[in-house]
Amino acid sequence: MVYQELGRPNVRRYHTYAKLRSFPPGLDDLYSRMMDQICDSEDAELCERILAVVSAVYRPIMLDELACFVDMPDGASDDESLVDIIALCGSFLTLRERTISFVHQSAKDYLLDHAGAEIFPSRRTEQQQRIVSRSIEAIDKAMQRDVYRLWHPSCSIEKVEHPDPDPLAPIR
């Protein structure tokens, strides 16, 4: 976040030291400032739901999976919109090759230790129960007989060309 701020074209070289002093020392203060910016944005509720999901899961999730766990605004399920939505979550999250993860373990630790009331209005275990429930619903919708159109049950899966987009990607 500091690097991005200093890299803006309107920051003059002689203002660099003043800009650096404007950032709070220590990660907790920096994360607190980022969380305040998210809470003050018009997309605060969406960002909090995304941060709750990403905080509650045990591995980084894919863009396709995120849409199963979080109610996205109408028209925001395409990749470009999802990338924009991830960017709204401040500098807590990063996106690499369709995988959403925390920029650092300290960001996840901060959210779990200090921002739990904002992102987990009920409790973390209830968030995990919602994830399980949404996963089961998504599996129920996506599963069908012969989803990869193998035609022969004894066919080797290695020899099959996977459809693009993969119908099972969101329920990975």
Image: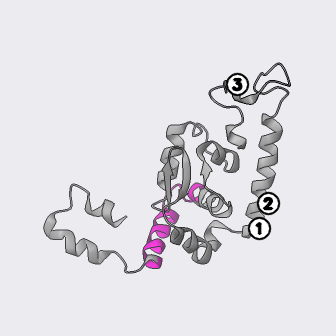
Q: Looking at the image, do the residues carrying marks 1 and 2 touch, with CB atoms under 8 Å apart? A: yes
Sequence-first disc among 1 and 3: 1
Specify the principal SS of the magenta part.
Answer: helix
- Which label is found at residue 125? 1
Residue 66, image x, y percentages: 64, 48
Res 113 → quadrant: bottom right
Residue neighbourhood size for the residue with mark 1, other residues' Cα within 10 Å, grouped as few (<14), some (14–19), many (≥20): few
Q: Is residue 169 above or below residue 116?
A: above
Q: Is residue 157 above or below residue 80?
A: above
Determine if the magenta segment contains residue 10: no
Identify which amino acid the numbered label 1 is placed on: Thr
Q: Quadrant of the C terminus?
A: top right
Residue 143, image x, y percentages: 81, 34
- Which label is found at residue 159? 3
- Report the magenta residues as a range: 28-47
- Which label is found at residue 129? 2
